[in-house]
Image: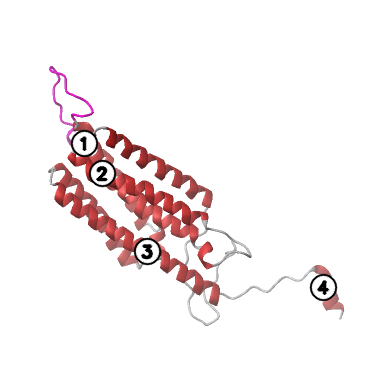
């Protein structure tokens, strides 16, 4: 797509789809590297500690985040413009952003609070000294979970890619579900109810996967409709040709 102002109405008289704004692919490529290496290394470190029972779902979430970042990179890499670009390549960057936002960032945000709690209390990582006093971290254990709040603002304020593929009400419902399932899974982890933790995490990942699949298909369909019905700009003639036309 060109960087010019987009048309509002198509050649058939109907309103054209509102596509996401143009975004810098280099920024999202850097995001792919961050989301690939950070959760992946954290998961490897947890596996080397012996993987306590409560680390199980956390490791799986971190590995999902890392793997999804690699898939997001594939989508971002297909983005292209110009004469050789097709409908799929034009939505590659947006689709990659959707994969990163929902299948890389959301599982990572879900894993971090439980990860911090287990690292703070793990006897495998640090054995307590005989004279040590067990000091509870209290409410400060919730600090890593605060990262979910700017993510919710990012989504609900219209910066997220999902804002362009689902209605406003659906966007709110999905994001409230994200928040609720992350809180529920963390609570289950704190209560050592790992069966329910897996149920909550499974529901969260399923919703994210279905939303991503729907979003990628919807973005491609929106781009096809926009390209099909968008008014075509008249080709600019050269000065020589314009002068010859006037003289004639």
Q: Which residue is mark 3?
A: 213
Q: Are marks 4 and 3 in contact (CB under 8 Å)?
A: no
Q: Earlier in the sequence, mark 3 or mark 2?
A: 2
Which contiguous range is marked in magenta?
123-138
Query: Is residue 150 in view from this perspective?
Result: no
Q: x, y (%) of residue 37?
A: 40, 40
Where disc 3 sits, the SS reads helix
Q: Earlier in the sequence, mark 1 or mark 4?
A: 1
Q: Are marks 1 and 3 in contact (CB under 8 Å)?
A: no
Q: Which residue is mark 1?
A: 118
Where disc 1 sits, the SS reads helix
Q: Are marks 1 and 2 in contact (CB under 8 Å)?
A: yes
Say few, some or many: other residues with alpha carbon within 10 Å of mark 2 (under 14 / 14 to 19 / 20 or more): many
For the N terminus, the quadrant is bottom right
As displayed, is residue 2 above or below residue 131? below
Q: CA distance from mark 2 to mark 4?
A: 67 Å
- Residue at horizontal 36 percent and vertical 50 percent from the top: 104
For the C terminus, the quadrant is bottom right
Q: CA distance from mark 1 to mark 2?
A: 10 Å
Left or right: 175 in relation to 67: left
Q: Which residue is mark 4?
A: 241
Numbered label tally: 4
Where disc 2 sits, the SS reads helix
Q: Nearer the viewer, mark 4 or mark 3?
A: 3
Q: Are marks 2 and 4 in contact (CB under 8 Å)?
A: no
Q: CA distance from mark 4 to mark 3?
A: 49 Å
Q: Earlier in the sequence, mark 1 or mark 3?
A: 1
Predominant secondary structure, magenta span: loop
Say few, some or many: other residues with alpha carbon within 10 Å of mark 3 (under 14 / 14 to 19 / 20 or more): few
Q: CA distance from mark 3 to mark 2?
A: 24 Å
Q: Earlier in the sequence, mark 2 or mark 4?
A: 2
Q: Which residue is mark 2?
A: 58
């Amino acid at each position: 797509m060109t960087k010019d102002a987009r048309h509002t109405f198509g050649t058939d008289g109907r309103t054209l789809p509102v596509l996401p704004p143009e975004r810098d692919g280099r920024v999202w490529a850097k995001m792919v590297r961050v989301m690939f290496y950070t959760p992946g290394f954290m998961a490897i470190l947890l596996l080397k500690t012996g993987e306590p029972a409560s680390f199980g779902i956390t490791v799986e979430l971190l590995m999902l985040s890392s793997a999804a970042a690699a898939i997001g990179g594939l989508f971002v890499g297909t983005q292209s413009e110009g004469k050789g670009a097709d409908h799929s390549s034009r939505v590659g960057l947006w689709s990659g952003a959707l994969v990163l936002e929902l299948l890389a960032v959301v599982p990572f945000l879900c894993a971090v609070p439980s990860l911090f709690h287990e690292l703070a209390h793990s006897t495998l990582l640090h054995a307590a000294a005989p004279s040590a006093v067990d000091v509870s971290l209290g409410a400060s254990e919730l600090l890593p979970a605060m990262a979910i709040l700017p993510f919710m603002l990012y989504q609900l304020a219209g910066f997220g890619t999902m804002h362009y593929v689902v209605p406003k009400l659906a966007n709110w419902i999905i994001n409230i579900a994200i928040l609720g399932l992350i809180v529920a899974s963390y609570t289950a982890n704190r209560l050592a109810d790992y069966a329910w933790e897996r149920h909550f995490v499974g529901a969260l990942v399923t919703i994210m996967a279905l939303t991503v699949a729907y979003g990628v298909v919807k973005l491609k369909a929106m781009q096809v409709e926009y390209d099909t019905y968008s008014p075509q700009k008249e080709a600019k003639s050269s000065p020589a040709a314009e002068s010859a036309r006037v003289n004639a």
